[in-house]
Amino acid sequence: MTIIIADDQKHARSGLKAALAASLPGLEMKEATTGLEAERLADEILPDLILMDIRMPDKDGLSATRQIKARHPEIRIIIHSLHGESSQEALAAGADAFVSKGEGFQRLLETIAALAIPHERP
């Protein structure tokens, strides 16, 4: 499984990367620091899943989610943000799920597992 971690905070990306590597061996992970970089990486590598923060420079995660889903509807996107009030906006933007950063890592793992069901590539 290939995942893009899109978050402008380096400590958030590195913490997630380490926790995911320990919990899901064999996972391939790439990092993006902006919404535009997440879009570019999505186009290049067609990941299975993107963990997308909302507030990032250049382009926010909601706008990036809309663009990625328009081009690659098969890519699963979890909006992973501190801003729980944005959960409805995230789903309206096309995200497959919303997990607040305050909900804990186990909740994120459960959501990843639920979305990891194999799907068709065009």
Image: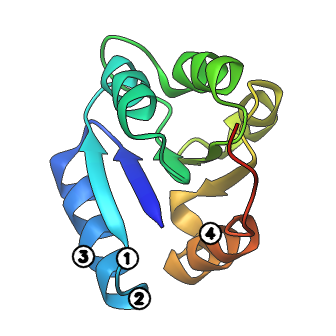
Q: CA distance from mark 4 to mark 1?
A: 10 Å
Q: CA distance from mark 2 to mark 4?
A: 11 Å
Any mark on residue 20, and which? Answer: 1
Q: Amino acid at mark 1?
A: Leu
Residue drawn at x 48%, y 48% as measured from the top left: 47
Lateral position of residue 13 relative to residue 97, left or right = left
Residue pointed to by mark 4: 112
Quadrant in the rendering for residue 59: top left
Q: Are marks 1 and 3 in contact (CB under 8 Å)?
A: yes
Q: Amino acid at mark 3?
A: Ala
Q: 10 Å neighbourhood of mark 4: few (<14), some, or many (≥20)?
A: some
Q: 10 Å neighbourhood of mark 2: few (<14), some, or many (≥20)?
A: few
Marker count (numbered): 4
Lateral position of residue 41 relative to residue 13, left or right = right
Quadrant in the rendering for residue 40: top left
Q: Secondary structure at mark 3?
A: helix
Q: Secondary structure at mark 4?
A: helix
Mark with earlier residue (4, 1): 1
Residue drawn at x 70%, y 36% as measured from the top left: 122
Q: Are marks 2 and 1 in contact (CB under 8 Å)?
A: yes
Residue pointed to by mark 3: 18
Q: Amino acid at mark 2?
A: Ser
Mark with earlier residue (2, 4): 2
Q: CA distance from mark 3 to mark 4?
A: 15 Å
Lateral position of residue 2 relative to residue 69, left or right = left
Question: Between residues 102 and 107, which one lies in front from this camera angle?
Answer: 107
Q: Locate residue 113, reporting x and y percent.
A: 66, 76
Question: Between residues 69 and 9, which one lies in front from this camera angle?
Answer: 69
Residue pointed to by mark 2: 23
Q: Locate residue 10, reporting x and y percent.
A: 17, 48
Q: Locate residue 75, reporting x and y percent.
A: 63, 42
